[in-house]
Each structure stands twice: as C-alpha cells, then as structure tokens.
Amino acid sequence: MDQLELFVDPVCPWTWLTSRWLESVEAELGLTVRYSVVSLLELNGDDPSNPWIEAMRQGRRLQRVMVRLLAAGDDARVSALYRAAGRATFEGGRTLDAELVRELGEGLGLSDEDIAAADDGRLDAAVVTEHQRAMRLAGPDVGSPILARRGGERGFYGPIVDRPLAPDEAVRLWHIVEGVLDTPALFEIKRGRAVEPRFA
C-alpha cells in the first residue's frame, strides 16, 4: 500500500478536486490517504480587505475539529469530515459556517466535544503546527493542497485539476505524480490557470 498524506484547506475548490481525484483511484491503486491541514489563513494573513477572509476564517473552524480528531488518531473520521464538507459546499452549494460544521459532525457521529472544537481557539496552535509541517515538506511559495508520502521528507503543491477526471485519466495522473514524488531533484512543474474549477 502507498501511504500518502494530503494537506488541505477545506475552503479551496482546487483542493477539493485534487481530493476527488485521489479518492477515485485509492482502491484500484492500493493507496491510503491521510488528511491533514494546511491553512490559507496562515498563508494570506487575517486581512479584512481579502475577499476570501470570511471563508478562510470559517475554514479554520473545520480545521480545529480535524486536528482534534487527528490528535486522537481518528484519521478515518478526518477524511469523512473533509469529504462531507466538500460535498456540501462545492457540490451542494452550502456555506461553510458554524451550522454546517455542527450538522456534519452530528451526521458523522462526532461527540459534542469534537463538534465544540470548532470554537476552541486553543486548537489554532495545532492547526499552525500541521500547517508548518506542510510548509517544511513543500514550501515556500505553495498553497493548498500539498501531497506527500506519509513519513516522507518532501511533498508537492498540487496536483491541480480543473474537473473530475475520467478513470483512465485519473490512473495516468497518479503514475505521473508518483514519479514526481520519487524524484528528489524535481522542484516545480507549472502552468498558469486560465479556467475556473468544475465539479461535475
């Protein structure tokens, strides 16, 4: 089994598409993906003039719950929570807010204490710790998502796709990314984004 780690900010639509790509090939290719957090709020600062500031602040709420679950070793529910949030927001049109975080938590059977973690600013330190770990793997000058081998020494920003991939495309992309992850001399492959993300 290939053990991977995907660092995500739950408000990033490009990250959601990356996670959907990985989810689509996990079983077929024998991959297991552990989700952790990288923070666009940490990268961009808490600037009130940023048009995404409220979304990033709400994303921090979900990330607090995620790091609480990670600390308890509950990787499966971190994955389930992130995926439920993505389906609700990017595919269902919901806004990521306190009401949705509670609804998702209850739907997954999280404890009241787990759900209440969304409002516990003391967990921000754990979010920052995971964010800094992601930056050590792939930074500087990267964003969300960051993909790495679990326990590895380096990771990469992306891959970024603009839509769900057909099964053959998804498998082909993994084989490309696998080579990238296993090439220590490689630092960057990039082209500018000229389209908006599509979820269907």
Image: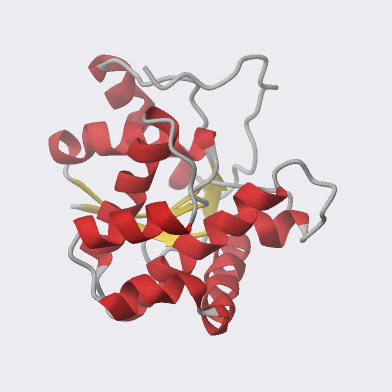
Q: Residue furthest bottom?
A: 122
Residue 121 found in image quarter: bottom right
* 105 vs 25, nearest the viewer: 105
Q: Is residue 28 above or below residue 63?
A: above
Out of 22 and 196, give the one closest to the viewer.
196
Residue drawn where x is 14% and y is 34% of the image: 28
**Which of the 4 image quarters holds residue 171?**
top left
Q: From this viewpoint, which residue is outermost toward the right?
A: 49
Q: Quadrant of the C terminus?
A: top left
> Eyeballing the image, is 94 above or below 148?
above
Residue 106 lies left or right of residue 181; in this view the side is: left
Q: Nearer the viewer, residue 79 or 22?
A: 79
Q: Where in the figure is residue 93, as x and y percent of width and height?
A: 43, 31
Q: In this image, 82 relative to 161: left or right?
A: left
Seen at 55% across and 84% down, the residue is 122
Residue 95 percent across, percent down from the top left: 49, 42
Count numbered badges in the picture. 0
Residue at 54 percent across and 55 percent down: it is 59
Percent position of residue 168, x then y: 26, 16
User: Can residue 70 be seen from the camera position used here?
Assistant: no
Q: How is the image coloured?
A: secondary structure
Answer with the quarter of the image where residue 194 lies: top right
Q: In this rendering, is residue 53 above or below 87?
A: below
Residue 124 is situated, as x and y percent measured from the top left of the image, at: 57, 76
Can residue 10 be seen in this snapshot? yes
In this rendering, is residue 95 above or below 160? below
Residue at screen point 30% across, 54% down: 104
